[in-house]
Image: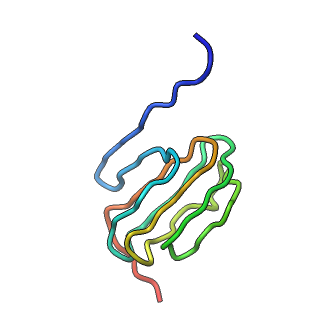
């Protein structure tokens, strides 16, 4: 067998719902919900909408750059053109001013 198989990933624990972004993911969560994005290896074309700190066509490699963002307006979204990007959606709300 050749090529890569990309299966959906969904992990739920007491603090986060974690999933792999394939194309575009909608984040239908209340404003202030904590969101983190982590690239597992190189990711390209990462774009977010409705988050406090938005990204446009960003190259997300494994780094702390996408950690601890938050939903600004509902529904928010994140998309990725290529690569394996994990979306961590927190089970708590932090409202900043």
Residue shown at 40% from the left, 58% from the top: 89
> Horizontal and vertical percent for residue 2?
62, 14
Residue shown at 45% from the left, 54% from the top: 25
Residue shown at 45% from the left, 84% from the top: 96
Name of the residue lying farthest toward the top = 1
Name of the residue lying farthest toward the left = 14
The relative height of residue 25 versus residue 96 in the rendered view (above or below) is above
Residue shown at 49% from the left, 53% from the top: 24
How has the structure been colored for display? Answer: rainbow
The relative height of residue 75 versus residue 11 in the rendered view (above or below) is below
The relative height of residue 75 versus residue 20 in the rendered view (above or below) is below
Q: Quadrant of the N terminus?
A: top right
> Horizontal and vertical percent for residue 65?
64, 62
How many marks on residues? 0
Is 91 left or right of 58, judged from the image as shown?
A: left
Which of these two is toward me, 57 or 13? Answer: 57
> Horizontal and vertical percent for residue 83?
62, 42
> Horizontal and vertical percent for residue 17?
35, 51
Is 96 left or right of 83, judged from the image as shown?
A: left
Is 88 left or right of 56, judged from the image as shown?
A: left
């Amino acid at each position: 067998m050749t090529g890569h198989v990309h299966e959906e990933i969904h992990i739920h624990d007491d603090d986060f719902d974690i999933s792999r972004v394939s194309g575009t993911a909608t984040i239908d969560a209340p404003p202030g919900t904590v969101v983190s994005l982590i690239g597992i290896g190189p990711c390209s074309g990462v774009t977010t909408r409705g988050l406090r700190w938005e990204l446009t066509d960003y190259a997300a490699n494994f780094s702390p750059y996408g950690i601890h963002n938050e939903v600004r307006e509902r529904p928010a979204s994140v998309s990725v053109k290529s690569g394996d990007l994990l979306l961590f959606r927190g089970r708590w709300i932090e409202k900043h001013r």
